Amino acid sequence: MKTFIIGHKSPDTDSIMSALVMANLEKNFGSTNEVIPCRLGNLNKETEYILEHFNVEAPMLIDSVSGADEVILVDHNSFLESAPDIANAKISKVVDHHRIANFETTEPLFYMAQPVGCTCTILYELYRMNSVDITPTYAGLMLSAIISDSLLFKSPTCTQKDINVAEALAKIANVDINSYGLDMLKAGTDLSSFSASELINIDSKEFNANGAKFQVSQVNTVDIDSVLNNKSEIEMVMNDLISEKGLDLFMFVITDILTCNSKAIVLGNKASVVENVYNTTIDDNVAFLPGVVSRKKQIVPQITENI
Ligand code: MG
Ligand code: MG
Ligand code: MG
């Protein structure tokens, strides 16, 4: 029997680390299944940096869960963000920090959700609740996920619990949070090798609301304008996806991790929603979004309500 553990499509650091950390926990629980951490897409540069730093192998790349007898979801629950055949799988557990949407099972399951900044913060608690030891390596992976999801504690999604857990993990991992955290985040801002289409897929999520469909992609940078040098190519790829998927709105959000401001390329027939929500103007398809860094807290709820 096989258990696949998966984070969301276009996996971010939390999705990758949570799959690895949850797999280790399942093994400690004495699962008789073969427990396999998996991923639904390529690693981003930040995640590559972390795995190299702690000398850990990446989860197995899959595009289907048909090979699994059961599946554990981490860092997501929405089937829109999961494996294409997830609706046919037996989901045995979910550990997540997102709103619950587009999710349904036929059987009872273990479900742990908390409104904290990172799935690894919840996993830390699961380790503690079950008295499972956290090795320095796993502490480093979990700490990295918290730094990533909270943008070094600057995101409005970050809670006091995330900070407390990160500090405890930093002690176990013997890591200086600020210097390591900045190095790690900066590794993720090297976007030079990505094509326009790859850029859009580094971190991209799709949503349905009020009969409308919208997609929000996000990249981190230390130089927004250098990403915008590629603007016309990015727009071409966005427009292709808009017609292919029938999207009403597509935002490509470029976030400066040092200033915590974003600019977004905004396209689609509902682009004006962005002007209304943020009380801003879209100039040549670009909107300035001061102080906006979190898709989960500062973009998705507001667009969902107003689209
Ligand atoms: Mg995530
Ligand atoms: Mg997360
Ligand atoms: Mg994220």
Image (cartoon, rainbow, N blue to C red):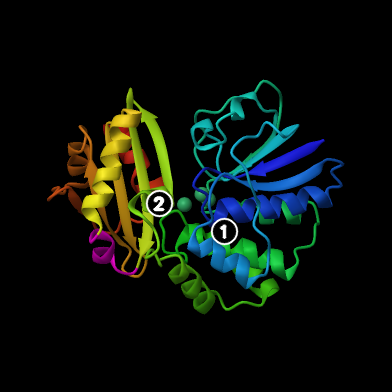
> Which mark identifies residue 189?
none
Q: Residue at x 18, y 40 (%)?
A: 276
Q: Is residue 101 above or below residue 160?
A: above
> Which mark identifies residue 198?
2
Q: In the rendered structure, which segment of residues is drawn in magenta?
A: 222-229
223 inside magenta stretch: yes
Q: Is residue 98 above or below residue 229?
A: above
Left or right of residue 35, residue 242 in this image: left
Q: Is residue 167 above or below residue 245?
A: below
| Amino acid type, callout 2 | Glu
Q: Which residue is mark 1?
A: 161
Q: Is residue 33 above or below residue 183?
A: above
Name which of mark 2 and mark 1 comes first in the sequence.
1
Q: Nearer the viewer, mark 2 or mark 1?
A: 2
Where is residue 90 drawn, in percent x and y?
70, 28
Camera-side residue of 200 and 54? 200
| Image quarter (top left, top right, bottom left or bottom right) of the N terminus | top right
